[in-house]
Image (tube, rainbow, N blue to C red):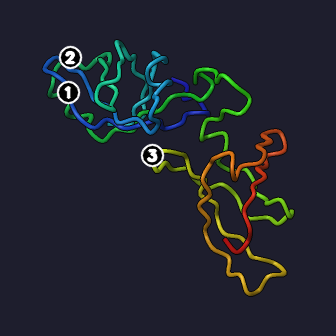
Amino acid sequence: MKIPEDLVQVGFVSGAYGIVGGVRVRPFSSEADALLKVKSWWLDKPALREVGARNAKLHGGDVVVRLEGVADRELAEALKGAGVFIPQSQFPALDGEDEFYWTELIGLDVQNLQGEHLGKVTDMMSNGPQSILRISPVNAEGHPEVEAQERLIPFVDAFIIKVDKAAKQITVDWGLDY
């Protein structure tokens, strides 16, 4: 079995659902489009393997699904804590040029309008209303009074000026001293 190189963790099994082997998956995205549309998932428990996903639907913020080979509640409970992965190449297409999957933003360089390098996006998180870029620290060259530190920048139009995936760069309206 060939493991896809572009696997992305999109959630984790939080427990069983029902008595006939359904599982409850806590998605990392509030929309959970990939979990709802992709019919083949990868689980990392007990070992990384591909499983068919049937009848996935949203239920109270989680996704409930029947997985092939999971025929009773005991088998479903045994999967609790398993990471759920989907190849990024199978993610549903986004509607607009200004929409991005988090995985597309991680690793991009971040610079401000003054051309100062703020670091790289190392992670994304959500505080509910918006996504937040987590920027790894860089030395503030030429600004010894500003200690390099992790930055959290809301991913909103007020601060995000441009995302250039080809150049692997995000331009933000964010100062070194923020």
**How far apart, in angstroms, are the residues tagged by discs 3 and 2?**
35 Å
In contact (CB < 8 Å): disc 3 and disc 1: no
Q: Position of residue 67 (x, y in %)?
A: 32, 19
Mark 2 falls on what kind of element? loop
Mark 2 nearby-residue class (10 Å; few <14, some 14–19, many ≥20): some
- Amino acid of disc 1: Leu
The residue identified by callout 2 is: 71
- Residue under the point 48% across and 17% down: 37
Mark 1 falls on what kind of element? helix
- Residue under the point 74% across and 76% down: 139
Mark 1 nearby-residue class (10 Å; few <14, some 14–19, many ≥20): some
Closer to the chain start, of discs 3 and 2, is: 2
The residue identified by callout 1 is: 75
For the residue pair 45 and 14, the one nearer the viewer reads as 14
Q: Nearer the viewer, mark 3 or mark 1?
A: 3
The image quarter containing residue 91 is top right
**How far apart, in angstroms, are the residues tagged by discs 1 and 2?**
7 Å
Identity of the residue furthest to the top in this view: 55
For the residue pair 146 and 55, the one nearer the viewer reads as 146
- Amino acid of disc 2: Ala
